[in-house]
Image (tube, helix red, strand yellow):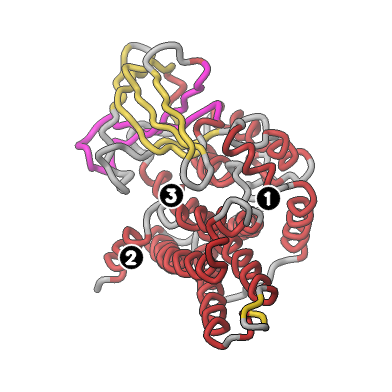
Amino acid sequence: MDFTLTDEQELLRAGLTRFLATRYDLEKSRAAAKTGPGWQPEIWRAFADDLGLLGAALPEECGGIGGGPVEMMVIAEALGHALVVEPYVDTAVVAAGLLRRAGGEAATALLDRIVSGAAVVTLAATEPTSGENWQDVSTTAERDGESWVLTGSKIVSASTPLADHVLVTARTSGDRADAAGISLFLIEIASVTTGLEMHHYRTIDDRRASDITLDRVRLPASALLGDEGAAWGSLARARDEGAAAVCAEAVGAMRKVLADTVEYCTQRQQFGQPIGSFQALQHRMVDMYMEVEQSSAAVYLAILRLDADDATRARAVSAAKATVGRAARFVGQQAVQLHGGMGMTEELAIGHYFKRLTALQFEFGSTDHHLGRYAALTRG
């Protein structure tokens, strides 16, 4: 397996890293997340206009520049390293992938707007009673003349407070937990006048999310994306793509946390010498390094298996998510402990990274969920 990046991928990494180092200030980002709109729209536009970032992992026929999963990994890792809150994974990976596979005039037009930075699109797939099972859909969509009428609720729809469009899963046929019968609908939020209620809030890692109630929301026939009742295959792939992307993001965050911890331990004095000179603490930092490298290897495998058959892709992604989930917990906790009480303050970056690493363990399926799925897929 070749882990070497091409010259173009190296340039992408270098350009994005340089941009984030010079133009993405962590203190300003936290202020926007806590008291402002939740993000920096000017940064999002710069991702599109200055870097071509939002289409870097999309094929040329979708308005992208012909990249793929490896480009997505490079971008997500760099964004994780800088603790970027802008919704790259939710919009440019998950939503863009769903729109690309759905096809059609509306999806293609919206993809172009995503690539140009003019639109933010998110997915609402989790329901109050479904837990981590996206296949368990009780939200319904019924035909009414030339329209669709949607009724149901969604929870913890990531980045939706920042979005102008949201993709919603709804059942058009079949029993509640069947894969068949799930459809995907596009809602332009500003165009819905009645029946749509959205409760926005800030999550523990300074992101934004929404709980959504649909009370007979009327949508035009064109809101249905793809074939009726046949969305599950694309949704399953989108969830694995999102999981692989946040795993790459976690690797970037863990690399930053490890580097900051090593630097702190070389500077913090105790008993007349740096605490990093104590062998017990050196062992802890070596253990952190090993967890990061194991996670990186698992992410590479998942990324290179995203285009494989469904079972192979699912096994690789679940292995990566379980590995990264364990590592994120260990690395985050060790970093906080080695920093002492300062590790959880707002003044140091380490506390913000710890909260993000904690949340990443549950996005697109928790560590336990993916351990269970991996076991099921590998059971003889």
Element class at badge 1: loop
Q: Where is residue 98 in the image (x, y as percent from the top left)?
A: 49, 40
**Numbered circles on residues, count:** 3
**Dividing the picture into quarters, in which one does residue 9 lie?**
bottom right
Q: Does the magenta stretch include residue 22?
A: no
Give the labeled residue for mark 1: 66
Span shown in magenta: 163-190
- The amino acid type, in three-letter code, at marker 2 is Leu
Closest to the observer, 161 or 46: 161
Instruction: Please give the name of the residue rendered at 67% of the width and 30% of the height, measured from the top-left corner.
Output: 118
What amino acid is labelled 1 in the image? Gly
Secondary element type, mark 2:
helix
Q: Label 3 amino acid?
A: Arg
Q: In which quarter of the image is the N terminus?
A: bottom right
Secondary structure beneath label 3: helix
- Distance from Cα at disc 3 to Cα at disc 1: 21 Å
